[in-house]
């Protein structure tokens, strides 16, 4: 056998033995009743960024050291291992639990922030259900209220802006979805709520345009006794649109709708006066 190939084979064998020994040593430590040694091993694994092994050891230790001298540190490191392993749901729970058990710890403020941060990380795409997003917003707001002087506040505000933007996009797409499926009454109601909930939305111009357009289609397809009131609402919405977005790309189309509303109202009023 070529000397270099023999050397490579020996190296691989030694590496395999080393890994197996390491695994055996870890398995023995996991089952060990030497809790002080286990604690030191957990810290070593953590510092070596071997978070899976550290997490399992800290989880094991948390049952033994509950209420003892190392309990707080174990709870903190356990949460950190979950976070660094990207188990955000479990990490959020652990950090919340930490703040309740150790309200006067030097880590309490950071644990409160990390609990909210983990909820933020769990927030799904805006196309999915936003229950978790709303919960994350609540937790971030609660952190900001509780620690208004925290150095984390700019970061918290950034996360809040992102999550609120996600809700805004979700609500806008729901409203436009009603319009696209010709559910014009639902579209007008949803768009009106959207405009009230998000007065500074970048979708405001589009929302007001679809409110005028959808409102008109809804109005002219209404019963005669309801049409007048609904046409007047469209005219009112047009006036708001024209005042806010006088140079809008939609102005010509909305002006045409306004003129049609006026003509239809004139027809109705003439019929009423006969």
Image (spheres, grey):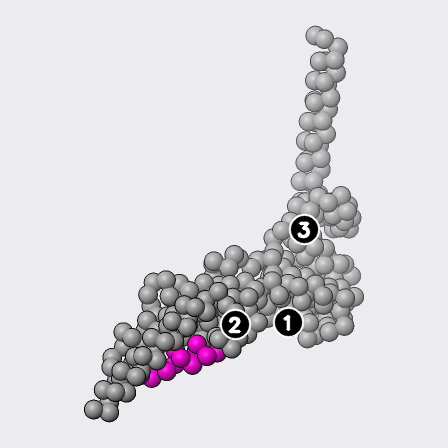
Q: Residues within 10 Å of mark 3 (few under 14, many from 20)?
A: some
Secondary element under disc 1, as helix, strand or loop, is helix
Which residue is labeled 1 in the image?
141
The segment highlighted magenta reads 228-240
| Residue 240 image offset from top left, x and y in percent | 48, 78
Residue at x 52% of width, y 72% of height: 245
Q: CA distance from mark 3 to mark 1?
A: 24 Å
Q: Is residue 133 visible?
A: no
Q: Which residue is mark 3?
A: 84
Instruction: Give the percent coordinates (x, y) of residue 206.
Output: 47, 66
Of all residues, the one furthest to the bottom in this rendering is 273
Whether 220 is drawn above or below 229: the answer is above
Task: Say few, some or many: other residues with alpha carbon within 10 Å of mark 2 (under 14 / 14 to 19 / 20 or more).
Answer: some
Viewer-proximal residue, 119 or 215? 215
Using the image as rendered, state which of residue 109 and residue 57 is in the foreground.
Answer: 109
User: How far from the left and from the top, in percent, is residue 58?
Assistant: 69, 52
Number of the front mark, 2 or 1: 2
**164 left or right of 45 in image:** left
Residue 209 in which image quadrant: bottom left
Q: Main SS type for the magenta part?
A: helix
Residue situated furthest left in the rendering: 274
List the residue tagged with mark 2: 245
User: Gap in Å between the C-alphas at discs 3 and 2?
Assistant: 48 Å
């Amino acid at each position: 056998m070529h000397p270099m190939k023999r050397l490579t084979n020996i190296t691989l064998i030694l590496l395999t033995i080393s890994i197996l020994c390491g695994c055996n040593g870890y398995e023995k430590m996991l089952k060990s009743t030497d809790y002080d040694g286990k604690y030191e091993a957990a810290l070593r694994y953590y510092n070596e960024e071997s978070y899976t092994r550290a997490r399992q050891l800290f989880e094991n230790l948390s049952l033994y050291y509950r209420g003892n001298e190392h309990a707080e540190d174990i709870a903190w490191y356990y949460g950190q291992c979950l976070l660094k392993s990207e188990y955000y749901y479990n990490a959020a729970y652990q950090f919340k639990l930490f703040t309740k058990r150790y309200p006067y710890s030097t880590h309490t403020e950071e644990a409160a922030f990390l609990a909210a941060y983990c909820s933020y990380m769990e927030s799904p795409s805006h196309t999915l259900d936003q229950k978790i997003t709303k919960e994350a917003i609540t937790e971030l707001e609660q952190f900001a209220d509780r620690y208004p002087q925290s150095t984390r506040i700019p970061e918290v505000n950034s996360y809040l802006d992102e999550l609120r933007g996600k809700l805004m996009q979700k609500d806008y797409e729901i409203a436009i979805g009603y319009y696209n499926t010709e559910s014009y009454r639902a579209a007008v109601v949803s768009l009106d709520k959207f405009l009230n909930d998000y007065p500074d939305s970048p979708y405001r111009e589009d929302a007001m345009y679809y409110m005028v357009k959808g409102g008109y289609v809804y109005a002219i397809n209404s019963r005669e006794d309801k049409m007048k009131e609904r046409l007047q609402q469209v005219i009112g919405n047009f006036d708001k649109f024209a005042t806010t977005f006088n140079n809008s790309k939609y102005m010509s189309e909305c002006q045409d709708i306004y003129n049609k509303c006026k003509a239809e109202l004139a027809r109705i009023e003439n019929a009423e006066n006969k």
